[in-house]
Image (tube, grey):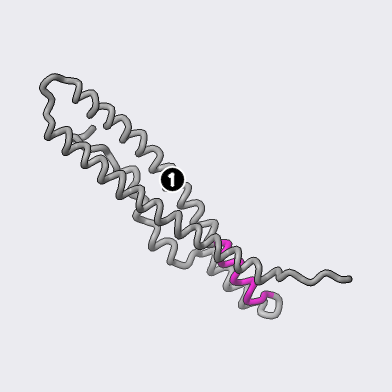
Amino acid sequence: MEGGRPNIHAVNQLDLLDEQWLSISPQRDDLKLLCEQNEEEVSPQLFTFHWAMSQVVEMEDQVLEDHRAVFQESIRWLENEKELLEMTEEVDYDVESYATQLAQILDQKIEILIELRDKVKSFRSTLQEEEQASKQINPKRPRAL
């Protein structure tokens, strides 16, 4: 524990996503160029589907990376909480210090877990968009009788 606080620098990458998810990636630029060069061959629905798929892949990678970082940070939190609990076994431990450090750990957990949860919600929404784009490419055709 550093100064009574867990080290959360490993999770700072959670803050990077919002701008990355909204920016246009080189893959999307390549897809747009391909579609412009082959207008007759690539439908708007196909372009939308490929765009959605590239977004899903990017977001999936980032969610997995963030999940791993939070998992690693959770291990550190457990170690720090163990130290706090061990501190309480001493006869004259500093109750105020214990309460302050526990509150700090809980605040950090809540903040980071909310960030991850919001990114997972966004990812799930993107998955649904991809599913809708997929359905527009492959509409179900009536069976021949």
Q: Which residue is mark 1?
A: 67
- The boundaries of the magenta stretch are 42-54
Asked which quadrant contains residue 41, the reply is: bottom right
On whether residue 124 falls in the magenta region, the answer is no
Q: Return the x and y of residue 31 as percentages of the image width and height.
A: 59, 69
Which secondary structure type mostly characterizes the magenta part of the structure? helix
Question: In the image shown, does 125 or 68 lie closer to the viewer?
Answer: 125
Residue visible at 24% across and 27% down?
A: 85
On whether residue 49 falls in the magenta region, the answer is yes
Residue visible at 36% across and 37% down?
A: 74
Q: Quadrant of the N terminus?
A: top left
Residue 6 placement, left or right of 55: left
Residue visible at 33% across and 48% down?
A: 112
Q: Return the x and y of residue 59 as percentages of the image width and height.
A: 49, 56
Q: Return the x and y of residue 20 as percentages of the image width and height.
A: 42, 61
Name of the residue lying farthest toward the front: 145
